[in-house]
Image (spheres, coloured by chain):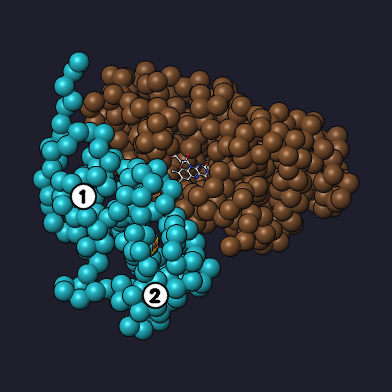
Chain colours: A brown, B cyan
Amino acid sequence: MSFTIATSIEDALAALAAGARPVAGGSDLVVGARHGKAPLPDSIVAIDRLSELSTITLTDDGLRIGALATHAAMMLDATIVASYSALADASALVGSPATRNVGTLGGNVMNASPAMDTGAPLLVFGAMVELRSTSGTRSVSLPDLWVGPGSTSAAADELCIALVLAKRPARSGSAYVRLEYRRAMEIAVVGAAASVTLNDDGTAGHVAVALTAVAPTIVAVGGLDAALIGRPVDEDTLAAVARAAAEQSAPISDLRASDSYRRHCVGVMARRAVEAAGRRAGGEAIAIPVNRAYGIGASR
Amino acid sequence: MSMPIKLSIDLNVNGVDYPVTIEPGRNLVSVLRSEVGLTGTKEGCDDCECGACMVLLDGQPVNSCSYLAAQAQGRAITTVEGVMRGAEMHPLQRNLLEAGGVQCGFCTPGMIMSATALLARNPSPTEEEIRIGLSGNLCRCTGYAKIVAAVQATAAGRY
Ligand SMILES: Cc1cc2nc3c(=O)[nH]c(=O)nc-3n(C[C@H](O)[C@H](O)[C@H](O)COP(=O)(O)OP(=O)(O)OC[C@H]3O[C@@H](n4cnc5c(N)ncnc54)[C@H](O)[C@@H]3O)c2cc1C
Ligand code: FES
Ligand code: FES
């Protein structure tokens, strides 16, 4: 087994081209090896020193978050908290302070777990993934990246450089909630992110919803426009969101929940996410993470 | 079969450089305990669940059971041995003893690392903030109340 520490992006790309696997925080890769899920790769390149990949910058195109931004950094970043709140909601729920301290956005996205918490927020923000290898850089949408549980369309020699989130229109709000049985060191039983943009008259102008842990990958909910656009975010529209989310989910049964329980609960999570996103779009402050403000998850 | 290649690296633990020669896949807790010889850091689950192995890397808590020792090169590692003030216990250690926050003691080094990191960035945490700060550390003995009380007493400067 070989191990190197990359000191530049070029270093890292050369190592990947030679067959190494990247490790950022190691909270999936190393933990998975200790679980016996998969042995550690034969050749590893540590990318955690590439500080140019941990920056979070607002540009004319939107928000660019470096692949090495940690959950701890994202949950506190002023722009993310104010304008991309669902992502802060998600990062604040990850693991424990130690997990959030080492775990990165790039690691979360490239690990491609159907239960990953940043996935649904990134999908409602229309995020694009920037991938780079020694032969060049390309930009991929998340539905094109995630091909199945733990599997992406990225080539083995491609490094995730950044995620670029679309610019937020005025009067927009977002939220992420997940069903959890305890308040820390948990995996989403199911979860939902929503982004809502309000018209001047307070009705919904744009709504996007995405779901966690109910399909082989994070999935967007389609066909919401007819039920929502031009309507107020009220009991009727929220019920339509819950129905659509439940209908479009294809959950499995495992030791954490049955498929029918997941299907029901993902509807509940979706309506709560839209409701919270709508309130935030209207200017109401709901503290990060919404899970705590809404009392979701076992109390201590 | 190829021979495992070993790495010769320096690990900076509690301000001292320790040269170690290890396989690249070794986890930090085992190197701290076996090569460096500091056994204060405990291994509980070896699975990133319990927090017994918590150490600080550049001041931030990390589960050392699930962190590659080789990846800690060039970073400042702090273990429970490093929180002592000379021969004196850290106030949090004294408060844990006085409050009854230590029973079997297996979780205690990890609790101390998470709590000292919390107090360094937030010197007067609320009870909720303390519970979040310790949320990666399991204790099977105390029921947590006295551990939280010890952190509160430390924040209030009582010892
Ligand atoms: C106790 C615990 C609790 C957790 N709780 C949660 C949770 O609540 N929600 C959640 O979503 N996740 C959770 N996780 C999973 C994990 O912490 C996150 O997915 C984290 O974001 C992974 O980031 P990392 O940097 O540690 O990834 P690593 O383990 O370093 O990497 C993960 C994978 O991505 C690849 N990779 C990493 N960076 C790049 C890159 N820049 N380019 C290309 N490939 C890359 C690696 O090769 C590896 O295959 C938890 C993990 C633990 C141990
Ligand atoms: S031994 Fe590391 S978390 Fe339990
Ligand atoms: S004192 Fe025994 S586990 Fe905490």
Q: Chain of mark 2?
A: B
**Alpha carbon of mark 1 to alpha carbon of mark 2: how far?**
27 Å
Identify the disc placed on residue B79: none
- Reading the image, the residue beneath label 2 is B100
Q: Vertical placement of A177 versus A41: above or below?
A: below
Which of label 1 and label 2 is nearer to you? 2
Residue A290 picture location, percent across and down: 64, 55
Residue at mark 1: B33
* Residue at image location 24% in from the left, 31% down from the top: A3
Q: Quadrant of the C terminus of chain A?
A: bottom right
Q: Classify mark 1: helix, strand or loop.
A: helix
Relative image position of residue A218 (x, y in whole percent): 62, 32
- Where, quadrant-wise, is the N terminus of chain A in this rendering? top left
Upstream in sequence: badge 1 or badge 2: 1
Rate crowding at label 2 as few (under 14), some (14 to 19) or many (20 or more) other CA atoms within 10 Å. some
Which residue does the image show at 76% across and 46% down from the upper left? A268
Tell me residue A108's x, y (percent).
Answer: 48, 37
Task: Point out the quarter of the image occupied by ligand 1.
Answer: top left
Q: Amino acid at mark 2?
A: Gly
Task: Please state the chain letter of the residue tagged with numbered disc 1 in the rendered image.
Answer: B
Residue A159 or A229: which is nearer the viewer? A159
